[in-house]
Image (tube, helix red, strand yellow):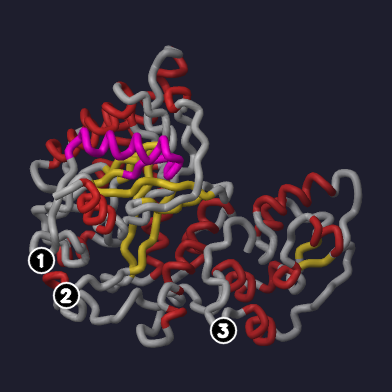
Amino acid sequence: MDLGEKVSILSGAAKYDASCASSGSGHDDSGAGGFRFGARTPAGICHSWTEDGRCVSLLKVLYSNVCRFDCAYCVNRVSADTPRSSFTVNELVELTGEFYRRNYIEGLFLSSGIFADPDIVMEKLIETARTLRTESGYGGYIHLKIIPGTGEKLIREAGIWADRLSANIELPTDKSLQYLAPQKSGKVIFSAMDDFSSLSSQFEEDRRRIKSTPSFAPAGQSTQLIVGASAEDDRTIINLSDSLYHKFSLRRVYYSAFTPVGVNGRAGISDPRLPDISGPPQVLDQAGPPRQLLTREHRLYQADWLLRFYHFSAGEILDDESPFLDPHLDPKTAWALKHLDFFPVEINRADYEALLRVPGIGAKTGRRIIETRRSRSLSFDSLRRLGAVLKRARYFITCSGSFIDKVEDPKRIRRVLADQDGAGLQLPLFEF
């Protein structure tokens, strides 16, 4: 099998892993020759986005799609009748270098099927990263997947060569993991996350005392949750994500709407353990037009944004009475309509925390408001210039006591602000 065929097979096998953003990297790129990067996308290239909205290109491939595990939701499971292939370390090093020199990419995302003992698989990923750094002089971004069951020693070495590591938790509960991926263990996955967190703290402490201590995965760790392959509600997922952020200091939790992958590679034949759907599920109704299929994933990302940047707690977003996110309203607006006693917020006096609760005012705009009003009072026009989305904010704010719209009919506001036709399904990067 030639290299082109391997790239086609092993990039296609990697496409379902969403956890490949490159935000937060502080790796020194002095060994990369100072290259600048274009936007051409040959096979195996994925686009990702940093937290500041910058688009980057990554070579996203598996080392091998040979796997001993039989996870029901995975296209690479051992029972799937799919073409199998594996790279060698030298092939991956050469491929990454060539794509980098041709301005195709600015980073590598490398995972693998579990074709042998987890430590053996992890050693191959580490050897690839180490060879790129030490022999090829590669200074670009590297994201390595932590193979479940890998020991702490190998996680330590992986973090020295890579900018980011990730251990995918896959499913929201251990019960679902045991049902759909019985060869995996939530305890083992959490152990890898905990090892990373401890090592990161240890390296940070060492660097305070010894300046020559190498960086350890400066872009942190992330994970991925598959949404809809099992029966958990959104509240369970959001509570889990909130716990992961606090316990393991994760940079990101990625949500991937379950997509059916047929048995033996044939569409329309699915594992009986999986829901019988034609695409990624919605929040409450699995039937409906295609443009609605990613609604649940989209709302979970918005709720995740509230956890990370808007200082909401998981319990404020969803509770026992409302275990699912509203499919037609972003979660911040849904919260505001349930807590009208909190509003209106006076723009010229409210503190930063109160501003963050206003739909249409995000973290960046909130900081601009605080800074600008030190020298002058704000009007609705100046608020718009600072970045507020007045289509949403107008119902929840006053400027020097004046309203644009008073909240007299919450049902009318809901009708105006709802995504009735599935519009706006792209994740807003900053303000909502």
Label 3: how many Cα within 10 Å (few below 14, some 14–19, many 20+): few
Question: Which image quarter is the C terminus in?
Answer: bottom right
Label 1: how many Cα within 10 Å (few below 14, some 14–19, many 20+): some
Viewer-side residue, 397 vs 44: 44
Q: Residue at x 27, y 70 (%)?
A: 229
Viewer-side residue, 359 vs 81: 81
Task: Say which label, 2 or 3, has the lower sequence index.
Answer: 2
Q: Is residue 378 visible?
A: yes
Q: Nearer the viewer, mark 1 or mark 3?
A: 1
Question: Is the residue under label 2 in contact with that under label 1 (CB below 8 Å)?
Answer: yes
Q: CA distance from mark 1 to mark 2?
A: 9 Å
User: In the picture, residue 338 is in which quadrant?
Assistant: bottom right
Horizontal arrangement in the rendering, residue 371 relative to residue 316 (left or right): right
* Kind of element beneath mark 3: loop
Quickly name the residue at label 2: 266
Task: Say which label, 1 or 2, has the lower sequence index.
Answer: 1
Quickly name the residue at label 1: 81
Horizontal arrangement in the rendering, residue 395 relative to residue 131 (left or right): right
Task: Say which label, 1 or 3, has the lower sequence index.
Answer: 1
Q: Is residue 188 visible?
A: no
Horizontal arrangement in the rendering, residue 392 relative to residue 427 (left or right): right
Quickly name the residue at label 3: 420
* Stretch in magenta: 88-109
Q: Residue at x 27, y 61 (%)?
A: 171
